[in-house]
Image (tube, rainbow, N blue to C red):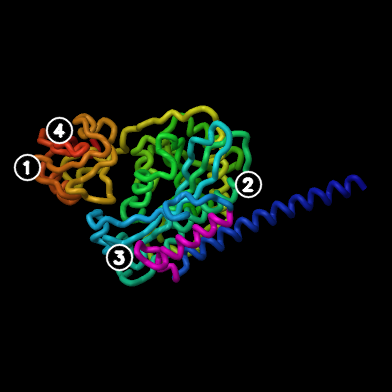
Amino acid sequence: MRTRILFITLAATLAATRLAAQSATERVAQDLRYLADDRRDGRGVGTAGLDSAAAYIAAAFARIGLKPAGDDGFFQPFTVDSSAPAAAHAGVGGARTKNVVALLPGSGPLATEVVVVGAHYDHLGKSVFGSLDPDSVGVVHNGADDNASGTTALLEMARRLTGRQGRSARTIVFVAFSGEELGLLGSTYYVKHPARPLNVTYAMLNLDMVGRLGTRKLTVFGTETAREFPALLDSVAGTYQMAVAGTGDGYGRSDQESFYTQDVPVLHFFTGVHEDYHRTTDDWQKIDFPGLVRVAEVASDLAWRLATRTAPLTLVKAPPPPVAGGGGYGAYLGTIPDMTESPGGVRITGVRTSSPAEQAGLRGGDILIQLGDTPIKNLYDMTDALRAHQPGETVVLVYLRDGQRIETKVTLGRRGG
């Protein structure tokens, strides 16, 4: 009889486990299919479909039990600056859009610090800007993997983390960013207007294109941004017996870069590029939903370990990865431009390690207004100015810092060298 009871109990446990896994798969499928539906207009900035997606995310945050942390409930509205380099090409200058921001309060002495978990929820809409389909004018780009998958994983992480408890845990801020496809607009706006100060932000986890796991390894970029990250990631991967490849610094054209340039350690979860990237064929039918659940499980566990560990992280500002070839782009300065606006010049969010810009004393927040004899009013002027010079030339560089005009000299470098 005892053996029979044990067998029944084990069978019930296995059935409950299967049901829970099935339920999670159904949840993420429901979320992703809504976000990647044709009726969302491809979630292009300025579309009703993107607004509908924002409302869906906010409602999900509310059901989960998170607290609103935006300027308007869960919403953090902002306007796309008409001078943003991508705005003119995409025809969205002056459009209103919003991040969706929610908060899971911490507890104990760690509660004043923050772990940010983010994913961008916008995509290309029906625009040809950024599309890799040559004949895609007026055709919806649903962006199921890019990045309905990351947004869906963000919601699933919120559900899982809300159910956890600890004697002391950092506050977790969940952010669905808008405008990533136009140059990290939403995340750049967030780091300028954070829900909690950046100087108490312990780490940032970004989920971008996590819907095609299949038999691949999960790649986690940014493991070189803190000395403790590789061991933490290995520990979590071992727990889930999942193949995970950790690599890279915090640069790269996704939202974690906005945080890394502000000295926050970052991780970017990614399941790989595929033939549907930025094409009209990136649809929900090609998503690996069980794999998406596994990514959310691993990322949730890692986020929780970061939220509860007592020791600090050791930030590592790694040198930039090699830049391929000169490609006709002229000399190298090593600045990281702010893509959200052109305030009479090119504002920079930071400089790359060991670059000519760093050696010249430039830093985040400076506005470049002249290089050599060329006035700089926007990013295109800056590109032209760099093309007009050769590596090794020493030229005059003029910039504004806190409204003060500063003139210095910089010796330009060679791209990739």
Q: Amino acid at mark 3?
A: Val
| 293 or 70: nearer the viewer | 70
Which region of the structure is painted magenta?
39-64
Mark 4 element type: strand
Using residue 94 as the reference point, say whether residue 233 is left or right of it.
right
Q: Amino acid at mark 2?
A: Gly
- The residues tagged by marks 3 and 2 sit, at their Cα atoms, a distance apart of 42 Å
Residue highlighted by disc 4: 410
Residue highlighted by disc 2: 163
| 313 or 413: nearer the viewer | 313
Badge 3 or badge 2: first in the primary sequence: 3
Mark in front: 4 vs 2? 2
- The residues tagged by marks 1 and 4 sit, at their Cα atoms, a distance apart of 13 Å
Mark 3 element type: loop
Mark in front: 3 vs 4? 4
Residue highlighted by disc 3: 128
Magenta span main SS: helix
- On residue 373, which mark appears? 1
Badge 4 or badge 2: first in the primary sequence: 2
Mark in front: 3 vs 1? 1
How many neighbours does mark 3 have within 10 angstroms: few (below 14), some (14-19), or many (20 or more)?
many
How many neighbours does mark 2 have within 10 angstroms: few (below 14), some (14-19), or many (20 or more)?
few
How many neighbours does mark 1 have within 10 angstroms: few (below 14), some (14-19), or many (20 or more)?
few
Give the residue at the far right of this rendering.
Answer: 1
Badge 3 or badge 4: first in the primary sequence: 3
Horizontal and vertical percent position of residue 271: 47, 50
Horizontal and vertical percent position of residue 280: 39, 66
Quadrant, the C terminus: top left
